[in-house]
Image (tube, rainbow, N blue to C red):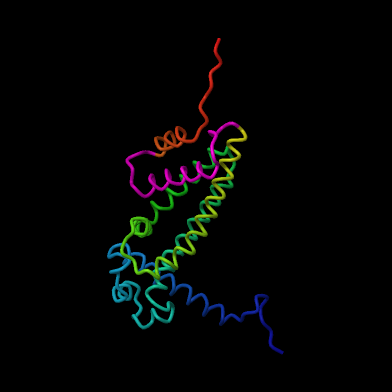
């Protein structure tokens, strides 16, 4: 009788999976640097191989093609970022405080991952990317973007119901919040977080009313 662990995998299989995951991350780290510095189109597998310590042939054991490698390089960080956005949206506080938490989470994440910031700017700027790469990433990133927008839209609705946020289409205001966040995080605006929070307030808070005596 063969005894296996509760996960249905023997220790050797787990070690192989761990080694493969570590190797994949080494290659993705190198790819992120190369694509950031050389561009998504011009970044070469040869340089990625040199930085990662794997041969070009070995890279093809983990990724089907350069298209696949670019897509997974983008998707890895996008998954991490969405997790941070979800955590920020679930924090305690008023709706606008939680929206600001999302802004702060974005600023912290992209500041810590400068190479990924460069890749996103390339995508948003319409860089010359091979068509299938952008198409593959777009399918996934739009799904993530849609999920993030749903969370922000719900926060806007809550803020409107409490009178904290201005009237208007909740999804349009959530889109405005997203655009402002992207500009702040990716355009390197010379604003402190407190200064940007003030801009955020001006765009989203409901106008204050004053009783006349």
Assign the C terminus to one quadrant of the image: top right
Q: Is residue 142 left or right of residue 35?
A: right
Which one is in front, 205 or 5? 205
Tell which residue pokes out farthest to the bottom in this image: 1
Q: Residue at x 37, y 74 (%)?
A: 66
From the top left corner, tell me how far across and down residue 26 is, in percent. 40, 71
Q: Is residue 174 left or right of residue 26?
A: right
**34 w.r.t. 10: above or below:** above
Does the magenta-highlighted stretch encompass residue 171? yes
Which one is in front, 123 or 49? 123
Q: Quadrant of residue 23?
A: bottom left
Which one is in front, 197 or 12? 197
Q: Is residue 169 left or right of residue 200?
A: right
From the top left corner, tell me how far across and down residue 180 is, in percent. 42, 43
Q: Which residues are magenta?
A: 163-192
Q: Residue at x 28, y 69 (%)?
A: 42
Assign the N terminus to one quadrant of the image: bottom right
């Amino acid at each position: 009788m063969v005894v296996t662990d509760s996960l249905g995998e023997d220790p050797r299989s787990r070690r192989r999976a761990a080694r493969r995951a570590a190797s994949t991350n080494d290659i993705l780290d190198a790819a992120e640097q190369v694509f950031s510095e050389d561009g998504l189109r011009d970044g070469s597998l040869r340089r990625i191989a040199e930085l990662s310590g794997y041969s070009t042939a070995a890279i093809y054991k983990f990724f089907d093609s350069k298209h696949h490698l670019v897509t997974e390089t983008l998707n890895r960080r996008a998954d991490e970022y969405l997790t941070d956005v979800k955590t920020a949206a679930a924090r305690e506080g008023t709706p606008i405080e939680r929206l600001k938490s999302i802004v702060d989470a974005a600023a912290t994440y992209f500041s810590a991952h400068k190479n990924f910031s460069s890749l996103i700017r390339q995508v948003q700027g319409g860089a010359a990317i091979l068509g299938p790469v952008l198409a593959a990433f777009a399918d996934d990133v739009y799904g993530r973007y849609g999920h993030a927008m749903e969370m922000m839209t719900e926060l806007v609705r809550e803020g409107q119901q409490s009178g904290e946020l201005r009237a208007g289409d909740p999804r349009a205001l959530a889109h405005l919040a997203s655009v402002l966040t992207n500009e702040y995080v990716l355009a390197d605006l010379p604003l402190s977080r407190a200064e940007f929070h003030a801009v955020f307030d001006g765009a989203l808070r409901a106008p204050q009313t004053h009783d006349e005596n």
